């Protein structure tokens, strides 16, 4: 376990758009540290970079006794300051008094999701600070992503919140990467979950918001298992969904049209705090089924959801505001943001700049950073905690 003491707590952020991966890693880690000693470095970058020289440069500039973790992304979130677009390499550093950090890795995670969650949650062993949170960085190609969260919940119980995101590959249909190591070297992994146990003498706050709203009457999930939805209101789910979108029953759009439809009209599940979003990944007209990477419980109420750019931007702002409010009046030193890659594709650069400005309006001069994900993790109560088309924020007090 690494811990920090003796200096004021701090949260640093370094961002580079250099094309050379070694240069990008060196610039980002130097800007994040500014000569200080960190206990944790989080590294996020797009798959256009060769991750090995980038990580070598980060390790070379990391200092001593520092844990390093991260993943490939669908783009970076970095502020305050002007919006710079989603590209580049980002390093986020934690340091100063009161932090304690442990890390763990679950390998071959995509075929044993719940066991991987149990293993990754081992990062919390030995974290005894007054305030604790488990960060999870998972392979975004994992199906049944909710089983990962259930495994971590089974290991940790209700007393430890979970946050994080699923690594992305910028829609390249390749395999996203996960990073794990220390100043001596960092592995580039696939099919893995990296767990980061973070303890602190000061509080954490978590925000979860999306900006979507129901568009029609509710439906009852009458036949489902995991993320496989077979029936809505006793009829084939694919037919009901297409009918709700105004498409003739049995009319199957081409794949590009279907992808656009599901991005614009996701499903929402009834929860105590509002609707939880499910992005449809596949539709099979032959069997009448729909598939998602997250669970759709049988018996749940579901809606087709709708939104608009202004509402999605307000959702991001609300997520940051919730996280800051969760500190109970304490001032944040930094914010971790996990934003959905599908939201990035839906909003486009102009509206992403508006989203950045909205988050910065809440954060003020406080640095905030993170990445666009293939699934957002946030559990504050209950065993469920995998989200889509949502913004999750962790405020560090």
Image (cartoon, grey):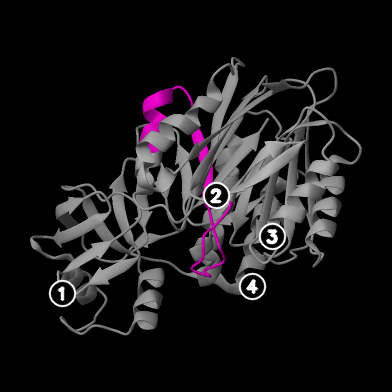
Q: Is residue 212 left or right of residue 175?
A: left
What is the C-alpha distance between the residues marked 3 and 4?
12 Å
Closest to the camera, between mark 2 and mark 4, is 4
Query: CB atoms at circles 1 and 4 under 8 Å apart?
Result: no
Position in image of residue 151 (x %, y %): 37, 33
- Judging depth in this view, the residue of 88 and 303 nearest the camera is 88
Q: Compare marks 1 and 4 and give the one earlier in the sequence.
A: 1
Dot 2 or dot 1: first in sequence order is 1
**Label 2 – label 1 distance at C-alpha:** 40 Å
Could you give the CA–CA distance between mark 2 and mark 4, rounded to whole angstroms? 20 Å
Q: Residue shown at 82%/49% (left/top)?
A: 57
The residue at which mark 1 appears reads as 286
Give the mark, 3 or 2, whose residue is nearer the N terminus: 2
Q: Secondary structure at mark 2?
A: helix
Q: In this image, 7 relative to 270: left or right? A: right
Where residue 389 appears, as percent x and y from the top left, is 45, 58
User: At 55% from the left edge and 41% from the top edge, which residue is drawn?
Assistant: 322
Residue under circle 2? Answer: 318
Residue 229 x %, y %? 21, 58
Q: Residue at x 51, y 60 (%)?
A: 175
Say which element carries label 1.
loop
Instruction: Inspect the magenta stretch and tell me whether residue 162 lies in it.
Output: yes
Q: Distance from label 3 to label 1 (Cα)?
A: 45 Å
Q: Which stretch is magenta? A: 149-177
Q: Position of residue 221 (x, y in %)?
A: 17, 54
As drawn, the residue found furthest toward the left would be: 234
């Amino acid at each position: 376990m690494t811990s920090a003491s003796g200096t004021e707590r701090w949260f640093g952020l370094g961002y580079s758009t250099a094309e050379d991966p070694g240069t990008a890693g060196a610039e980002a880690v130097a800007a994040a540290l500014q000569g200080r000693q960190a206990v944790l470095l989080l590294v996020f970058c797009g798959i256009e970079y060769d991750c090995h020289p980038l990580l070598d440069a980060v390790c070379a500039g990391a200092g001593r006794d520092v844990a390093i973790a991260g993943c490939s992304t669908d783009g970076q979130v970095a502020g305050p300051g002007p919006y710079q677009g989603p590209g580049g390499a980002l390093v986020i550093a934690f340091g100063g008094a009161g932090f304690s950090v442990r890390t763990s890795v679950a390998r071959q995670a995509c075929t044993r999701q719940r066991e991987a969650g149990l293993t990754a949650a081992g990062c919390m062993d030995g974290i005894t600070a007054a305030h604790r949170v488990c960060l999870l960085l998972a392979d975004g190609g994992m199906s049944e992503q909710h089983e990962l969260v259930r495994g971590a919940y089974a290991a940790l119980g209700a007393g430890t919140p979970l946050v994080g995101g699923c690594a992305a590959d910028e829609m390249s249909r390749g395999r996203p990467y996960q990073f794990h190591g220390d100043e001596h070297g960092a592995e580039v992994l696939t099919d893995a979950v990296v767990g980061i146990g973070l303890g602190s003498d000061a509080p954490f706050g978590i925000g979860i918001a999306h900006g979507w709203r129901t568009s029609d009457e509710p439906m009852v999930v009458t036949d489902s298992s995991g993320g496989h939805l077979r029936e809505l209101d006793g009829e084939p789910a694919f037919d009901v969904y297409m009918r709700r979108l105004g498409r003739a029953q049995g009319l199957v759009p081409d794949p590009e049209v279907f992808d656009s439809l599901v991005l614009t009209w996701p499903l929402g599940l009834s929860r105590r705090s509002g609707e939880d979003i499910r992005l449809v990944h596949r539709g099979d007209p032959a069997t009448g089924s729909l598939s998602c990477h997250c669970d759709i419980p049988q018996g749940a109420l579901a809606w087709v959801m709708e939104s608009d750019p202004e509402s999605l931007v307000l959702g991001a702002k609300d997520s940051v505001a919730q996280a800051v409010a969760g500190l109970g009046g304490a001032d944040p030193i930094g914010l971790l943001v996990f934003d959905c890659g599908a939201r990035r594709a839906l909003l486009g650069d102009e509206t992403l700049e508006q989203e950045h400005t909205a988050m910065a309006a809440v954060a003020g001069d406080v640095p905030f950073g993170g990445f666009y994900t293939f699934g957002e993790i946030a559990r504050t109560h209950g065993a469920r905690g995998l989200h889509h088309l949502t913004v999750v924020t962790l405020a560090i007090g």
